[in-house]
Amino acid sequence: QVQVVESGGGLVQPGGSLRLSCAASGIIFSAYSMGWYRQAPGKQRELVADITTGGSTNYPDPVKGRFTISRDNAKKTVYLQMNSLKPEDTAVYYCNARHVYSRQELWGQGTQVTVSS
């Protein structure tokens, strides 16, 4: 089955850490760039981090220095390490896979991250 499935969300206090995982199946994982997006209530979905097939990473300013994306091609998994979490990081986090040539995209079902004391 062609899919990506997120895990690792939950409730964490401000300043805490979480690591999200996204496991892919049914695809040639190494041919896909991978990304994490998030969507808070009433807001548009926004990019959190992405990583190319070659391992180059990109982060928007709100998470730069706090979040780290990585990938393990052997495990067909991409990770998002989130440190120094803030209440404004609260959102549903989605995994995205995009084929480098066909631009085919896959989205996961999302995992909730809540940062609150």
Image: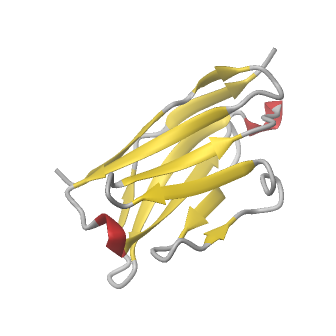
Which of the 4 image quarters holds residue 28? bottom left
The answer to whether residue 49 of the structure is visible from this angle is yes
Q: Residue at x 82, y 34 (%)?
A: 86
Using the image as rendered, state which of residue 13 and residue 81 is in the foreground.
81
Image location of residue 43, percent across then percent down: 70, 46
Image location of residue 68, percent across then percent down: 66, 53
Q: Is residue 112 above or below residue 53?
A: above
Q: How many marks?
A: 0
- Left or right of 2? Residue 95 is right
Q: Quadrant of the C terminus?
A: top right
Q: Is residue 21 above or below residue 1?
A: above
Image location of residue 66, percent across then percent down: 78, 48
The answer to whether residue 45 of the structure is visible from this angle is no
Q: Residue at x 71, y 33 (%)?
A: 90
Q: Is residue 55 above or below residue 39?
A: below
Q: Farthest residue toward the top? A: 117
Q: Residue at x 32, y 58 (%)?
A: 74
